[in-house]
Image (cartoon, grey):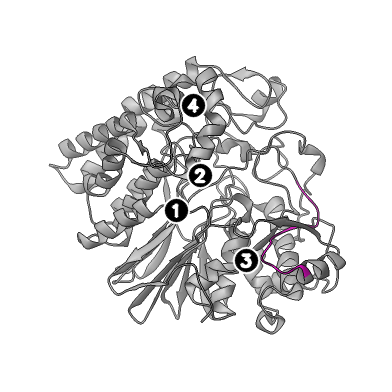
Amino acid sequence: MPFTTRPVIRGTHGVIATGHYLATEAGVHILRSGGNAIDAGVAAGFCLHILEPHQNGVGGEAPILIYSADRRKPFAINGHGTAPRRATIDWFREQGIDLIPGNGFLPATVPAAFDAWITALREFGTMSLAEVLAPALDLAENGFPMYNHLREILVAKQEAFLRDWPTSAETFLPGGRVPEIGEVVRRPLLASTFKKLLQAEKHAARVSRDAGLQAARDLFYKGEIAERIAEYVAETEIMDASGKPHRGLLEYDDMAGYSAKVETPEVVNYRGIDVLKCGPWCQGPVMLQQLALLEGFDLKAMRHNSPEYIHTVVECAKLAFADREAYYGDPEFDDVPMDILLSKEYAAERRALVDPTSASNDLRPGDVGRGPLPYDPSSAKSDLPNYDHDTTHLDVIDAQGNMMSATPSGGWLQTSPVVPGVGFPLGTRGQMFFLDERRPNALQPGKRPRTTLTPSLALKDGRPFMALGTPGGDQQDQWTLQFFLNVVDFGMDLQEAVDVPTFHTSHFPSSFYPRSMFRKRVVVEERIPESVRAELRRMGHDIVIAPGWANGRVLGVRITDGLIEGAASPRLETGYAMGW
């Protein structure tokens, strides 16, 4: 066996992997206390809001995939927030803004994560909010040790917080300073918000569990929390990347009218395995398109991370991401031709475009019979800072075969100030809308922006098989794809599959402000040999070398004949898998 950084975690009762080991431990605690995989996943998700505030938060999003053992069906929870009613293309044009900024209040959508967790718990869990929120409440009240990556972010933001965002300074800089590594970090204001939610649940739970969950949800979206958010956004001007200060567009009625949605996942069969993703309101189907293209190649014969293999995967990614730019958006507003994009016939047509010896320089969306609007790279502002922040992830499987994969993101501390009285920042996901009404994913009131957030599930012979995913913006469905191929095509165990070096292309426009695009660029971890890099350069790829353990924080859990296994990438130090 090759060396791996950690052992594969194996158990028979349940295994969970998350972006922080304390969130993973909380999930194991819930499983040991009788909860199912969904209870454990929701508990871990709330903990990640506390433990990784630079990656995600209560004010952000949480797309979720679930396989229900009882119903023997997979489900997707659309945990994306909607654009405010006042957010229109005309409004931005009147302000002289041609690209929605990546910071401040203008890109704020309705905070969606809380309703996503409540929806998962109500529809597929077994426990109360009080039970699953208890570990996160403990972390908020009693704290957790500061670690390197979080401290680095706070050091970078310290001056700006103290100068411009006093509520964020009060929350994250106790005494006006950044806590040292190992120093205990607490979130007392957020703990207070959690307690109010639990009090609302407790009172209504006398009627039923569902009534208790609904009462907590109503307090968030129709009660004091929504009122405080709306008041702060309406009264406070925040400087943003447009170069001017702005109040926000989000109002109370936007919050009150919001709800997460339970949907049917998109699916592609790859070598006998059904791979499931959320719909085109995220970038999830782009991984399915890549798989449909790659199924026509003998990847194993190419050898893992050979020049031929990397070239083939990258060229297929270029084709799939070109379609993402041309067609993906909120299907309630945009006519997204998923039946064509995920078909075997379409994949065969597109596969023929892959030149085995030369890197393509073009962004080439396919023809679905209506003429896509190509991306205009002149709309990018590559001379401005790129708000390409990270995300987190969790996967869990229990002994009954329940599976959950979630990718919480947004509402991070870097780009919007903490809302006073509630203890968390708002998200900035609206930056992903286009201000061009001819395009899919164009801004409209009540619309969900197409994001990069993309959990994954897999079924084998119709039975639960794998939950997997990673943070990483536009790279998520490239790194997750490689992990999946490492397991399925190359037969690696889960830990080897997350440890081996990765690569990705940024040939397509970034989803984040200012939407930079780097044609032919391929970023490879330096552990990929120079001989491979040289051959890729000869093929025409623009090779950028990243540190050896820089890219991806892939997590994965799988179940086979009652044995549950899990693994977590050691990148960025805190991800961990546990089980028993």
Check disc 4 and report the residue beneath it: 417
Task: Determine which quarter of the picture holds residue 422.
Answer: top left
In the rendered image, residue 23, in percent from the top left (x then y), is placed at 35, 52
**Amino acid tagged 2:** His
Check disc 2 and report the residue beneath it: 149
Distance from label 2 to label 3 (Cα)? Answer: 21 Å
Q: Which residues are magenta?
A: 517-530
Q: Would residue 353 be visible to someone looking at this image?
A: no
Image position of 396 with respect to 436: above or below? below
Q: Is disc 4 in contact with disc 2, using a CB cutoff of under 8 Å?
A: no
**Amino acid tagged 4:** Pro
In the displayed structure, does residue 387 sit left or right of residue 356? Answer: left
Q: Earlier in the sequence, mark 2 or mark 3?
A: 2
Q: Earlier in the sequence, mark 3 or mark 4?
A: 4
Nearer to us in this view, 553 or 328: 553
Distance from label 3 to label 4 (Cα)? Answer: 36 Å
Q: Is disc 1 in contact with disc 4, using a CB cutoff of under 8 Å?
A: no
Q: Earlier in the sequence, mark 4 or mark 2?
A: 2
Label of residue 574 in the image: 1
In the displayed structure, does residue 214 sit left or right of residue 257? Answer: left
Distance from label 3 to label 1 (Cα)? Answer: 18 Å
Residue pushed farthest top? 235
In the displayed structure, does residue 127 sit left or right of residue 104? Answer: left
Distance from label 1 to label 2 (Cα)? Answer: 9 Å
Q: Earlier in the sequence, mark 1 or mark 4?
A: 4
Nearer to us in this view, 575 or 422: 575
Q: Earlier in the sequence, mark 3 or mark 1?
A: 3
Q: Nearer the viewer, mark 1 or mark 4?
A: 1
Q: Is disc 1 in contact with disc 2, using a CB cutoff of under 8 Å?
A: yes
